[in-house]
Amino acid sequence: MDYSVYKEKSIEGRYITMESIGSCLSKLSTAPIPIGDSVNGVEIKAFKLGSGDKKVLMWSQMHGNESTTTKALCDMFNFLGSNEPLAKNILKHSTLMIVPILNPDGAIVYTRENINKIDLNRDAKNLSQPESRALRELFESFEPDFCFNLHDQRTLFSAGKTNKPATVSFLSPASNKDRHITPTREVAMKLIVAMDSMLQNHIPGQVGRYDDGFNDNCVGDTFQKFGAPTVLFESGHYPGDYSREKTREYIFWSLLEALKTIVENRIDCFKTGDYFSIPNNQKLFFDVLILNPTIVNPEIETGHAVGIRYKEVLDGDKITFKPEIAEIGPLEEFYGHQTIECIDNKDFGFRTSQKEILDLLLNFNK
Ligand SMILES: [Zn+2]
């Protein structure tokens, strides 16, 4: 199957809002189901597809600036509208309830939180925000057999203690403080193993496992506690792909693999033990790691390196990446998505496009 056929051409990059996915959603044969309004009065929409007995609830962009999975959902909508046998099989044996953007106000201003500055993924107990209540009410009325909680993670994560970025990470959230392996958690673990096995053929070593500390303010932990196997998806960095178009494709494949596993009744073909072989996410990456920066600025101690992380800034309808110094030190165990070694004090090994980084170094401690 050729992904490019199904890739929704009307959207790309990181800035994705209800407006930008409008043309994708208008192609759907099913009418949107209003599930509530955001703080700013934007209608939150769910889409019901398929008519099978296995019910899957998915929501994306509960964090407004985490849009990769929303793009992948649009691609999946296109696929499900095709004549592919897998598409037909998914729609025959499952009913999907999909919320492409749960936090439309946060999406517009490109923030994690909603417009009241509340993190909706820490609001599962209080349900203080209309977006949180909309999702909870949908969960209660739909009674899903499976939940997919769709997110993005920062570029800092590696898959284990390696120089491989965690391009995709998963978690079967804990449902109690002791992080017991309940039957519900096991189902989610097996689905993750199914997706990991597929992904290893495409991005070997670039799949990570997210931290499973229990927090009942988190939606995934709560739904898992209520007995619905819940999988957390985290879209991460693929080398050179700050627009997350490659990761988008791997999320598309992951969603299909999980649905395929569900509708073909193959969950028990996978082993819980293999879930624990997926390496834990580690925070080992900087966006840029600068070696030997002393040559540029003698204020920086000899032997130290500079770790730069990009801050994502909304500029019109584009996201720009503004470098900031995150850490200075030996940084021996760290990696850079880009590594710059300062060689001489004339051009410092920098290209003109990296002038912003050069200025950061020159102005450090001045
Ligand atoms: Zn998130």
Image (cartoon, rainbow, N blue to C red):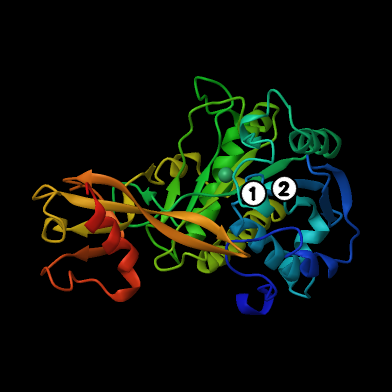
Residue for badge 1: 64
Amino acid beneath label 2: Asp
User: Residue at image x 80%, y 37%?
Assistant: 134
Q: CA distance from mark 2 to mark 1?
A: 7 Å
Relative to residue 241, is residue 364 drawn left or right?
left
Is residue 2 at least partly visible in the picture?
Answer: no
Q: Residue furthest top?
A: 177
Image: 274 above or below 166:
above
**Residue 48, x across and y down, in percent:** 84, 53
Q: Residue furthest right?
A: 31
**Quarter of the rendered image showing ligand 1:** top right
Relative to residue 73, is residue 97 drawn left or right?
right
**Residue 220, x across and y down, in percent:** 63, 35
Count neighbours of disc 1 (C-alpha within 10 A) and say few if under 14, some if 14 to 19, many if 20 or more: many
Residue for badge 2: 105
**Quarter occupied by the N terminus:** bottom right
Relative to residue 246, is residue 165 drawn left or right?
left
**Residue 269, x across and y down, in percent:** 57, 49
User: Closer to the camera, 225 or 355?
Assistant: 355
Quadrant location of residue 319? bottom right
Q: Residue furthest left?
A: 302
Is residue 212 at least partly visible in the picture?
Answer: yes
User: Closer to the camera, 256 or 316?
Assistant: 316
